[in-house]
Image: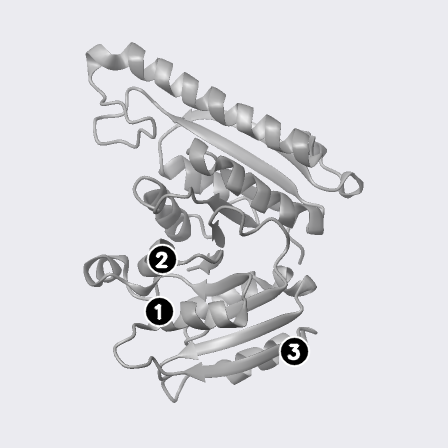
Amino acid sequence: MAVKKIFVPLQNAAAAETSLKAAIAIARRHKAHIDALHIRQRPNVPAGGYYPVGVIFVDEHLSELKEALEAEAAALKEIFDRVMNAEGVAIVASAAHRDDAGATASWRDQQGVLPFDLSAAARVSDLIVFGCSADELGYPDANLIEEAIFQSGRPVIVTPPAKFERTPRRILVAWNGGREAARALSAAMPLFEETDAALVLSVGAIPADLEGPEKAAELLRLHGVKAEAKRRAPEGDAAAEDELLAVAKDWKADLIVMGAYSHSRWRELVLGGFTRKLLKQSDFPLFLAH
């Protein structure tokens, strides 16, 4: 099935344009609608909530918080309008989208509780797109991405600036034979339609009772994708994620498709985790599914 509705959370002005341009690239190919949502944290949420504008919440700062939230929303709406105008994307309600209009988009600004309301809204979409700023990905952006991966039930694209402004032509699939990898491969199928090549890569040993990258590449070829398989063992003390990124660079990948958090979230947090490291280190767009 094609991608028809792309959900774009807009909470960070530094990453908003990146998010929108990546969503537009996909929407143009699939004649899809972009649902851009900004959630203003409710001022009566207890301390410890998510406040992207960095204001400490206490009663006497309520008016300052409201003003800051208003300014943040206005800045994000300005970016949305500017990008859509520059890219020639029509702004229409989601229910009014028609394929003959090509890519369309809509803006929503509502009060809510982050990250919970964001994940709930994303469940009625085909795909979530997050852009990263030029700085290292950190809290609160990483927290929102992680919650979306776990709680939305939808696949997530995370892209650095200027890395996803056209549909990917060369897609690398990180394969370990697990259910998360299978889920990611299945969810990413619409993105393989315009690929020139796909590489299914396994880094390290795969248990004998699981299917290897050769079978995953075979599935892609049955779908008409020019795909090959490769197995790599980490060299020396190199970590698996470093080996994956090295292959992606040498192969000139446009996108990495991978299962996210195949271990428990607590274990990933304590041990570092393959997914967390890729989110922090990758210069490539990532397509993630859990």
99 left or right of 235 in image: right
Q: Are marks 2 and 1 in contact (CB under 8 Å)?
A: yes
Residue 138 falls in which quadrant of the image?
A: top left
107 left or right of 103 in image: left
Q: Residue, x 54% and y 66% (percent of image)?
A: 253
Q: Nearer the viewer, mark 3 or mark 2?
A: 2
Report x, y in % for residue 115: 36, 38
Residue to which mark 1 is pinned: 242
Q: Earlier in the sequence, mark 3 or mark 1?
A: 3
Residue to which mark 2 is pinned: 281
Tag 3's secondary structure? helix
Mark 1: amino acid: Asp
Mark 3: amino acid: Arg
Q: Nearer the viewer, mark 3 or mark 1?
A: 1
State the count of labels: 3
- Cα separation, mark 3 vs mark 2, equals 30 Å
Q: Nearer the viewer, residue 287 or 17?
A: 17
